[in-house]
Amino acid sequence: LIGGETVGKALKGGLPPPVMPSEATTVEIALPLPVANTFTYALGEFDLPALGTRVRVPFGRKERIGWVVGPGRPGEGRRLRKVLAVLDPQGPAVTAEILELCTWIANYYAAPPGLTLRAALPALLTDVSTDRVRIVGRPRDELRPRERALLDAIERRGGAQRVATLRNLLGKGSIWPEVDRLVREGVLVLETEVPKDARPATRRVVRLTVEGLPLGERDTLFSRAPRQRDAFEWIETAGGSAALADLLGEGEFSRSVVSGLEQKGVAVVADEEQFRDPFRSIPVEAGPALVSTPQQAEVIRRLVSALDDPAPRPFLLHGITGSGKTHVYVELLAAVLERGRTGIVLVPEISLTPQTVGRFRARFGDRIAVLHSGLSDGERYDAWRSLRTGERQVAIGARSAVFAPLTDLGVIIVDEEHEGTYKQSEAPRYHARDVAVVRTRAAGAICVLGSATPSLESWSNVAAGKFVKLELTDRVSGGALPPVQVIDLRVPPPGAGRPAPPAARSGRILSPELERAIETRLDRREQTILLLNRRGYSSFVQCGSCGDVAPCPHCSISLTFHRRLKVLLCHHCRHRAPVPDRCVQCGSAELNYRGLGTEQVERVVVERFTDARVARMDVDTTSGRWTHHEILGRVGRGEIDILLGTQMIAKGLDFPNVTLVGVINADVGLHLPDFRASERTFQLLAQVAGRTGRGPKGGEVIVQTAVPTHYAIEMATRHDYPAFAARELAERKEPAYPPHLRLLNVIVSSPDEETAAREAESALRSARSLHGQGIVYLGPAPAPIERLHGRWRWHFLARSRSVSRLGALASFLAFDHRTVGSDVRVVVDRDPVALL
DNA sequence: AGCACGCCGACT
DNA sequence: GTCGGCGTGCTC
């Protein structure tokens, strides 16, 4: 896709492009637009830059930044516009390795090449120009209404205004005709601000040039300069260097004191690039186990020896919860760094895994760059550049860290490789785990996919001999996995005089068994984790008389009642509606709150255990950047007795004092219309069960469910992943689903219901007639979530064992298929992780 | 994405 | 005869 066949081949062979740089007069540029093609520009005075170099080019009436992907394709002699500037004097922003990787992604996922490249780089490197207008004169002629409105808007806001802002303000399409006319009339001037080239932020830093100055020398050196001595020791305490601003501000030293230190030759003041890293303030915890168990040592040995293999196969590290996978990662990375190579650690959601990140930071300190979604553009750029220059050699982060610009890559570790968050939900819709496999294969690096509950894809890749399995079957603590007690929500509690109706039992939220277990923990000053994978207070509000349920007006799901906010909230589009006092359909005042959410569980728990310190963790309580750390910090310090939350509490937490895990209702999500529903339920239960029994005190798990005989629940309670995998693989044979074959999910959406249905059918018809060979189609049908964000959604599935045939189909649907009708969108999702 | 062009119905 | 809304196709 990028620059045609020749570029791909040239890259693979590491050969120069087929045209000698000096001869080339045109260049092929990928621009960050949702289009399949690249654009040809004249080079003018410039030599052909290296592939991956950023250039500034005119595009339409704007300037944009694009990437050189090859010499220009011979055109038909049409006039080409000229490259305005070649950026990246210190070398291309996109290395040959990353360019090749992006080419693969763009091809495989049928994604626009420019959007793929943009996804691989920090935003600061892809900014476009902005246009501003300012009033400089009075209009002579009569103004049209829209011109009048434009001038009023500028006057009201004062000064220079961005054209894009003004367009949004006025609504209704482009305002360029008006701007152009007013500029010609001399009423406005137009200023185009060129994209700012990302310059590293610098700050003045004072650094001491001597270390451990003896007391006697100190006395003589500073005998008549007590302030200089104070400043010297202030900087010493700060670790040998300090920001000049801090010294003058917090330290309240004057500039002349600093000059005095410079004069004496004990300190230098210099501009230093500034690295701002919010993870710095998070306390670094030393790892609990510094000595490997024999099992860990064997796994580490096998991984390290694979570093010498020129073409190692990817490893699947199947280690039960608490078996010390992180320790293996840390030791492996240490070995990689020792050999002068570099590494990437991918985690599903970095803000949820502060403990894991802490372990890496404790071991690798300044050699590691933490890529976090909370980073500002500047911080992200700083981190990226530190990796590009080799100043830091390890990147840790979510999905996009797979693009970390490291040279001589030794390893990519994908922690919790089964997690769906590795799939990007917008173009390019790549799966970071699969991209990691591709990147390591090309780089001759090793790939380690770790999980206690591997994806069935990886599991079957082991069976097929594509991956190598390594196992950790013992917990580091020496303890066994915690025993799991299943509470059948359909059966009345033991000791009840007569059988209670099922509702009475499920209506209790906490079974007597779970209540007693929590009580015991409170008595023993131990901690409890309660999981309910559904937030809010109750899932929906149902009329007791006509049965009507209040739906979201934009999506086809029911609104969730949030008690604290006193609103009904759509969990997809965040639509808010007031809580009704009577049914909108029949007017009945008898409204029932059905379905259970974390908020309601919190209320019940707080009322039942009045002395307990309870914290709730879900997206409603953790909107702030660092709220996760704050809540988890309190759990770690023993300030919380009961931690209640959604799936975000199931991952990566390691607190030895947690001796009880209660699952309020294991069935949430089990009955979703998605072929991975069972797999996800098993994973969630297995993961949350693993949060306990990590210390000498042991642990216990209580799972409440209405389907205790379902294999996902049964095998999770037995901690038997291989048995689950075998059963689930059999379940997916007929009808066939991944990993037995590959899937393409095609979603056609439109604000109009009939248009969505008609266009889905028409897309499927073209697909069948042009790509019928070796592909089995299913559908079209309304998507499981039929309406989302005010759009009607229809979808169909294409299933095939042929990677190349599905690729051709994906590319056809994404770029060549024409739709008819208003605002129709076609999304092509290759290897989808969810069909909703 | 963002824009222009051209078609069509509605209003002067 | 003119305006504006919307569908379509191009941007190098």
Image (cartoon, coloured by chain):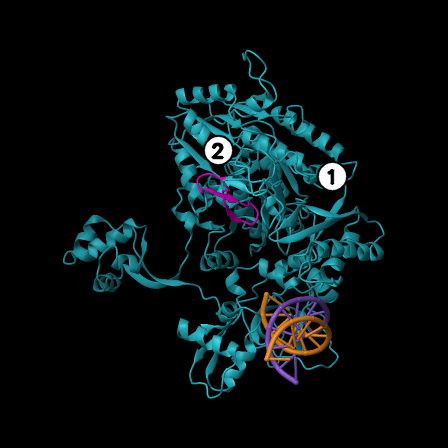
Chain colours: A cyan, B orange, C purple
Q: Is residue A55 visible?
A: no
Q: With respect to residue A702, does A33 lie above or below?
A: below
Q: Quadrant of residue A485?
A: top right
Chain letter behind tag 2: A
Residue type at mark 2? Gln
Q: Residue under label 2, please give it.
A: A600
* Disc 2 crowd, CA 10 A, few/some/many (<14, 14-19, 20+): many
Secondary structure that dominates the magenta span: loop
Q: Is residue A17 visible?
A: yes
Q: With respect to residue A479, does A51 lie above or below?
A: below
Let me know if residue A576 is in the magenta part.
yes
Identified at 52% across, 66% down, the residue is A127
Q: Secondary structure at mark 1?
A: loop
Q: Quadrant of residue A666?
A: top right
Coordinates of residue A164 in the picture (x, y in percent): 51, 70
The magenta-colored residue range is A562-580
Q: Residue under label 1, please give it.
A: A465
* Disc 1 crowd, CA 10 A, few/some/many (<14, 14-19, 20+): few
Q: Secondary structure at mark 2?
A: helix
Identified at 49% across, 85% down, the residue is A142
For marks 2 and 1, give the one nearer the viewer. 2
Coordinates of residue A451 in the picture (x, y in percent): 60, 36
Left or right: A549 as drawn, with respect to A361: right
> Which of the numbered marks, if any, corresponds to residue A594?
none
How far is disc 2 from disc 1 in space, using C-alphas?
A: 48 Å
Q: With respect to residue A521, does A243 lie above or below?
A: below
Coordinates of residue A625 in the picture (x, y in percent): 44, 48
Let me know if residue A482 is in the magenta part.
no
Give A135 or A786, whichever is nearer the viewer.
A786
Question: Which is more N-terminal, label 1 or label 2?
Answer: 1
Left or right: A694 as drawn, with respect to A260: right
